[in-house]
Image: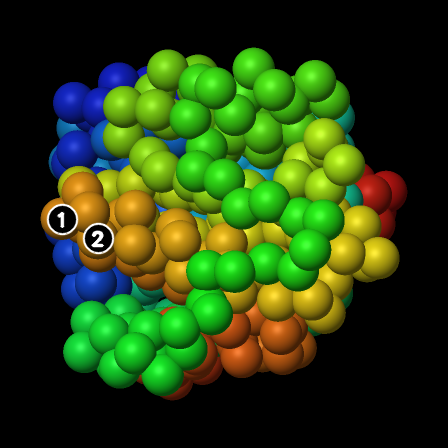
Amino acid sequence: MLVLLDQPSQRKQLTPFISGTNGHVVMGGVLAGLQCGCVYADQLHAPKSALIWAKNEMFYLIGRSDNEHFNSLIREVLVQELLPEALDAGEDMLNLEVYPEPGSDWSSVLDHMFNGRLREGLRVPFQFNLTQYGQWLERSSSSLFVPRGYELQVIDRAAMLEDKSCIIEQEILKFWHSVEDFFQYGVGTCTVHQGKVVGTCISVFVSGIHHETGINTYDPIHRGKGLATAMASAYVQSVLERKCVPHWTTEDFRHDSITIASKLGFEQGRAYPVYYMPIQELLDF
C-alpha cells in the first residue's frame, strides 16, 4: 500500500520534485503543512513517486511515472479515500496535474489508470511584474475604488467579526487548517454590500514568500462592476507590504480572471495541460 506522509519533515523529501516549477506555491504549501491536503508516496524514505492532494484546488502526480507498484495503487487511494472526501467537501471535479521526473511521461499511465476517460484542459500561469503593476497603478488612480453601496476592506479580525454570515471564515477554511494560521501567514481583502460580504480575494496557498491568489465574487449580480479588480489590487499591495510575491494561475476559459491578472502586471506564461473528469463519474465505473 502507499505510504501517507503526514509530517512536514517527511514531505520535505519531495521538495526536489517541484524545485523546477518556480517553487510551485500550491504543492509547496501542502508539503510544508500550511494548507490542507494529503500526500501519499511509494515509500517512506527516499520516495520516487507521490500523489499530492491540495484540498479544493488540485491533485498532483509527481516523480517517476514508471513506478509500477505506485501506479497500481493510486486509483485505489483516490476512489476509496480521497475522492469521497473531496465530494463531501463540495468538490465535484477531479482536477489533476502531472510533474514527471525528467525523462518520465505520465501520459500512458493516466490513460490506463482512468480508462482513457480523462479530459484535457489548459491552465494559464502568470508571473508578477512589479514594474508593470506600478505603471498600472499610476494609470488607474481609481483602481482601489468600488461603486457606491460597496465597501472594500482588508480581511482582519474586525472584518471577520462583522461578517455575520461567516463567508470569510468559510473561504479561509477551504484551504487553511485554521483562521489563526491564515492571519499569521496569509493576507486577504473583501467587498461588502449592505452589510454582507459579496467577494473575497485571499492567499489560498503560501510557500515561503510566495502567495497563490484565490478570488471570488459569489453572486453574479455583483460581477462586472470592478469589484474583483479592486479586491485583487488591494490584495497585491498587502502581499507586497509583507515583502512577498503574489502568484496567479487560472484556466484558459476564465477570461475575466486572465484580464484582471494582466491588468495588475502579471505576465502570462505558457499554458500547460490539466486533466479532469467528474468525481462521481470516476467513482461509478
**Numbered label attached to residue 243:** 1
Left or right: 265 with respect to 195? Answer: left
Q: Nearer the viewer, residue 102 or 36?
A: 36
State if disc 1 and disc 2 touch (CB < 8 Å): yes
Tell me, yes or no, if residue 139 can be seen here.
Answer: yes
Residue positioned 20% across, 71% down in the render: 130
Up-down: is 36 above or below 118?
above
Q: Nearer the viewer, residue 192 or 67?
A: 192
Residue positioned 36% across, 83% down in the render: 139
Q: Nearer the viewer, residue 2 or 8?
A: 8
Left or right: 85 with respect to 129? Answer: right
Name the image colouring.
rainbow
**How far is disc 2 from disc 1 in space, using C-alphas?**
5 Å
Residue positioned 30% across, 78% down in the render: 138
Q: Quadrant of residue 284?
A: top right
Up-down: is 236 above or below 174?
below
User: Which quadrant is home to the N terminus?
Assistant: top left
Total residue callouts: 2
Q: Give the percent coordinates (x, y) of residue 205.
A: 38, 42
Up-down: is 125 above or below 278?
below
Q: Give the percent coordinates (x, y) of residue 45.
A: 17, 28
Residue placed under numbered mark 2 in the picture = 240
Q: Amino acid at mark 1?
A: Lys
Q: Quadrant of residue 224?
A: bottom right
Q: Give the SS element for disc 2.
A: helix
Q: Amino acid at mark 2?
A: Leu
